[in-house]
Amino acid sequence: MGQLRDIMGALADALADIDGANQVEGRMCLEPSEPCIDVYPADPLEEADERGFGFTTGALLFIVRARVGVQDFDAVQDILLDWMDGTSDTGVAALLETDQTLGGLASSVDVAPSSGYVSFLDVNGAVNRLGAQWIVRVIPAVS
């Protein structure tokens, strides 16, 4: 596999056993089985150097997106809030930052704080889901 697919798969693997998830995917999931977490490249994919000269730091950026249905609104909010909790060792950020090497693929993993609640429409614009997302900064390991 390629570097991007390997890293996205490793990020998903780090979340595979998160409490409450029915589905965790290492790529964008268009038809989720909620509650669902998916991982895909951010825009931009590469982090620009702070000096603004167009050089990159070598860091890759990914979106980790959590979505829940809205049928039992209180229950799904509880799941989402647990995942968003930056002080919990079982939240998304803590689970992603536990192995800073992603099994040897990275030299560091840094998770930005969670967004607040976000409304996500499916690809047909028919189903509305509640969710949150994180930007994950990964510096690939040098081989």
Image (spheres, rainbow, N blue to C red):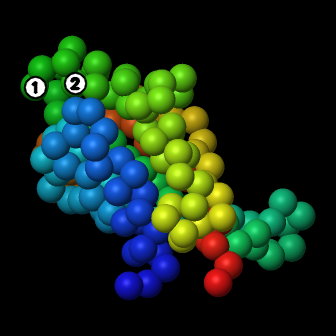
The kind of residue tagged 1 is Gln
Residue at coordinates 23% horizontally, 45% vertically from top-left? Answer: 36
The answer to whether 91 is drawn above or below residue 81 in the figure is below
Question: Which residue ends up furthest to the top in the rendered image?
Answer: 74
Picture quarter containing residue 95?
top left
For residue 15, say whether it is visible: yes
Q: Answer yes or no: is residue 45 visible.
A: no
Question: Element under label 1?
Answer: loop
61 or 102, which lies in front? 102
Of residues 119 and 82, the one drawn nearer to the viewer in this rendering: 82
Numbered mark located on residue 71 in the image: 1
Crowd class of label 2 (few under 14; some 14 to 19; many from 20; radius 10 Å):
many
Residue at point 29%, 49% (across, down): 16
- Sequence order check, earlier mark of 2 and 1: 1
Question: What amino acid is at disc 2?
Answer: Val
Residue at image position (28%, 43%) is 17
Where is mark 2, residue-wise? 76
Q: Residue at x 68, y 79 (%)?
A: 142
